[in-house]
Image (cartoon, helix red, strand yellow):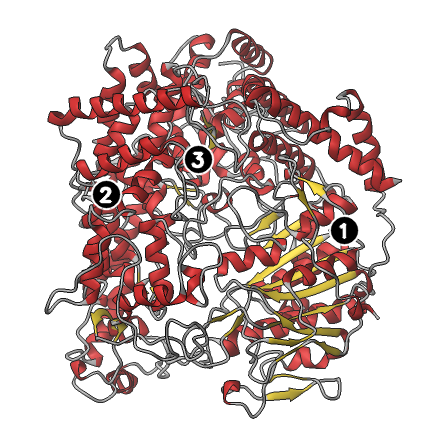
Amino acid sequence: MTRSRDWFVTRPNSRFARFLMLGLAAFAICSLTDSELPTVSAQTRKAPPKKPEPPVQVPERKIRISGVNQATRSTALASAAKVDGLMEANYKKFKVTPNPIASDELFVRRLYLDLSGTIPTVKQVRQFVTSTDTEKKSKLVDLLLNNPAYASNFYNYWADILRLKDGQLTNNVPGRPYCEWVKESLEVNKPYDQFVYEMLTAEGKIWDTPASGYILRDSGMPLDAMNNTVRIFLGTQIGCAQCHNHPFDRWTQKEFYEMAAFTFGTATRRGAGDKKFGGGNVVNKLREDMKKIDEKFDGGGKYNKFLISNLFEVYDNGSKLVLPHDYQYEDGKPKQLVTPKTIFGPPAKIEKGESPRVAFAKWMTSPENPRFAKTIANRLWKRSFGAGLIEPVDDMKDDSKPENPELMDFLTAEMVRVKFDLKEYLRIVCNTKAYQREASTAEVTPGDEYHFPGPLLRRMTAEQVWDSFITLAVTKPDEYQKEPARVEAKLLNIDLSKATASMIYEHNQELASSDIKKARDARNKPYSYKGQLLVRASELTSPQAPGHFLRQFGQSDREAIEVSTEDGSVPQVLQMFNGPITHMLLEKESLMYKSVTAEKSPEARIEVIFQSILSRRPTNSERQVALAEIKAHGDAGYGNVIWALVNTREFLFVQ
Amino acid sequence: MFSQLKSLDELNRRSMLEYAARTMLGVTVLPGALAFGADEKKEEKKKGEAKKSSGSKPNSPGGTAKHVIFLYMNGAMTHLDTFDLKPGRETQGETKGISTSVPGMQFGQTLPELAKLAGDMAVIRSLHTETGDHEGGRYLLRTSYKEIASIRHPGMGAWALKINGRLNRTLPDNVLIGGEARHPGAGFLEPAFTPVPIGDPNAGLQNTVTPKYLTEASFEKRMELIDKFDEGFRKKYPQKQVEAYSEFYRQANQLVHSEELKAFDLNQEKAEVRDKYGRDQFGQGCLLARRLVEHNVRYIEIGLGGWDMHTDIYQNDKLPRVAAILDRAASVLIADLKSKGLLQKTLVVMATEFGRTPRINQNAGRDHHPGAFSAFMAGGGIKGGRFYGKSDKDGFSAEEDDVTIGDFNATIGHALGLPLDKEFFSKSGRPFKVAHDGKPVTALFS
């Protein structure tokens, strides 16, 4: 080899000659030596032993996936046709010309992004585009609904709504078990009404009943908790009525209190002196004992992850809610006892021996509830089209008029008919012609009526951008799993009435033990690159630190409901210019690199690059530009083309 | 004259967009917008920008502020325990008052350093709103408007840039340090005015160094390639969200080649100076803000979270901890600006979305309370050493000289010399003003 064949990057000096000798696809980048891109295979799941040490066991969670039922396929397709019928009528009514049906290339990209949360690989694109099967679209819908990536994708969606945090959910209580429960619920496609019911009625500690995380998330804020619940699941905002009659809706402060009364008797924390723990202040007692065992312990917060977290559990203590001391309306007196009463729909009946909370959960998740099914039907419509039939999706009012009322009614009824099976519902939506149309090209001003001639153009969510990069770079990104909650749970979950100081000391030692650390290293190392863990967003800690790629692209901080954004910023672009994520694509271990080098001719390589990144073939003029670039800069030209393509708006937006 | 030019610029830009909207969506907006020809657009824009870069602003009898440092107390700061003491009342809780450098002015005991600077501070104690919801409160505080689905209103930083123009042409001129995930940003104004978020002030602006293997020329080449490959898409989707990204690409490209980037590098400061501000994110954020002001950056917001104290408010890790962070960083910031002669042209504002309940709840905390709360301003022409407005005896409602959020933002606008009565039109043709209909508290300036 006489000519330097640096790949993808311009580096004329020959310092990297040793790489060049390695083979045809010689490659160099400034800091290749300190990191290599993960290639994941079954073997690398275990740490590579230097000496003949026993292999490190990496605890895994068994994943069960429930997919869609083949038997209901034709029914779903018939429902989709009905949706289209209602859409057509609406187009006529508003004299709207629907957008043309999207090309296979556009469709396959959008469907992967909507259902799997990532762009498709070049292989997946080609498979779909070249298939002559007339039913290939609906088959792809089923395929993706049955794919584990569905749970990963919708986990990100719910993490934003439910404010999922792996770290502290509330005072020393870890959120990890709850997060895992949400993920598992999506994997087994738990019916949505059951999913919500379990959260609302959960009893116990986070480790024993992870669904209790929902109530623990708002620990100490019983009124806000009700406000959040109604907003998330019933698409209604009653929060203003917490302090006074709602200024823009019909809710009165009394009605707010009547709703809050259902869950006010639900406690989240036991006192350290609770008789359950044997009397006396169990926390102080254990702290004193700990001092004898751990010399360095000053009686402070060091052991709170055992002592305080185990005080937290969801249980009903029957507390009664009274109106505020300064209640100012005619319909009640200050400090008057409030009787639970629901705000709309058939009243909730509290059965004998049943806690008001259970009655409330039944009322809320019932098919009879006028807003429960409607809210989730509208939410998922928005997830698919970029706008809800009712906007905002979490602020419905009595007089909120859906853009297409007949369609809203039909979708709500369908949600009930499929028994809150969200995959089945999405199967209907994704099979509609409306969904399969091109995105609207013109600006849609917020507040203007949108008649859904097709989906809206949307910037990818932060997680979609990230996961798409992972798809481009990592060979088997879906094999990585976060550490299962049980690893820490079995050490953190203790019974304070029986716990001893020495036991807590041991558990604490074990938490920090080298065994746990080794397993973590073995889990993460094959996926680590320049300090970044290259795995699906749903397997990363939630939320990521403010400077992380995901946060820069708008991932929620998990402090408020649905605060993720799709706005641009200068730091995002800097990340794209100079951050490790765009450059990892140019590394020789990356999937991108391998796919390109698997082809011989520049034309074929350019085609792979375009289909990998934009899911489409280059136009003639784009091909010429790319060829000229490669001709001018040799192999580094490929790197420039790849880098430029991920920096296009076309890459970032979902058409 | 100048402000007229700029309004032309605004109208022309709008007219183009609206023309596009009309032809494509079949909707009519803003009658008269088309009266301006598209040809004028470029020229007017150039003129406007040339003027803007000189940093001049329309004549307005306002304060002397060129820069704003907005200290945002996220989560709703308790007013009764900080700036609005109610000694002798049950609602006072465990907080005790301390004397300040100004006779008769007392702050909470957790603010000893700020107390020494009371002479520079005008403390408003009669703010009030209607919303007790964090999101709603934050939005209102930053925009003076209630959050609604159909439009996004601009934050004050975006207004300042829009009207007074950019001060620094290369560095981001509107910076948000440690802000929460959602910020109204530039609202309906040009995306270029969106604050640039800095997650961690210690890390500064990340990813500003181009990989070593790239030469200047090859970087430019890459930029050209992006444009070529993206041409078709951008033509097909002439939408603001797409244009916004193109703008961010332009700005980022300019930035990576700028010498001034070191303004973002706190390592340029001595360790003692960094310690003085406090090594927490807020403290370092304040230091970064000072550096940015020195580099002529116009608007900086820094967030300090942890004020949402529903439980155990007097516990060590709650009020005492958070107030100490504020006290240290804000006092050093004001003193530093003063000693560097920057305070006169820098308005330092500290505010929060609402107050906390006078009555201490069963969990030994305070809940949300929009009826009365406090904020302060210093520098930028503000005359310090006094309280403005009053809440009632228990800090429940604003009682005297009440100040709405609109008034509060109008006061900031006044300090910056922004035209408060002027209407600006959103793309859909709706009129908006800098501080809604707020009236500036001009008494603070004299």
Please determine if labels 1 and 3 lie on a single subunit: no
Q: Secondary structure at mark 1?
A: loop
Taking depth in this image into account, of A249 and B112 the one nearest to the observer is A249
Q: Is residue A527 above or below residue A547?
A: above
Q: Earlier in the sequence, mark 2 or mark 3?
A: 2
Give the CA distance from mark 2 to mark 3: 21 Å
Location of the C terminus of chain A by quadrant is top left
Q: Which mark is residue A186?
A: 2
Q: Please identify, in this view, whether the residue under mark 1 or under mark 2 is nearer the observer.
A: 1
Q: Please identify, in this view, whether the residue under mark 1 or under mark 3 is nearer the observer.
A: 1
Taking depth in this image into account, of A331 and B125 the one nearest to the observer is A331
Q: Is residue A21 left or right of residue A140?
A: right
Where residue A561 appears, as percent x and y from the top left, is: 41, 53
Q: Quadrant of residue A392?
A: top left
Chain to which mark 3 belongs: A
- The residue positioned farthest toward the front in the image shown: A330
Where residue A490 appears, as percent x and y from the top left, is: 18, 63
Chain to which mark 2 belongs: A
* Residue on which the image places disc 1: B421
Please determine if labels 2 and 3 lie on a single subunit: yes
Where residue A566 appears, as percent x and y from the top left, is: 49, 39
Q: Is residue A532 above or below residue A490?
A: above
Q: Which mark is residue A393?
A: none
Q: Secondary structure at mark 2?
A: helix
Q: Is disc 3 surrounded by few (<14), some (14 to 19) or many (20+) residues within 10 Å?
A: many
Where residue B225 appears, as percent x and y from the top left, is: 59, 20
* Residue on which the image places disc 3: A465
Can the viewer see residue A168? no
Residue type at mark 1? Asp
Instruction: Please report contact status of discs 1 and 2: CB closer than 8 Å, yes or no.
Output: no
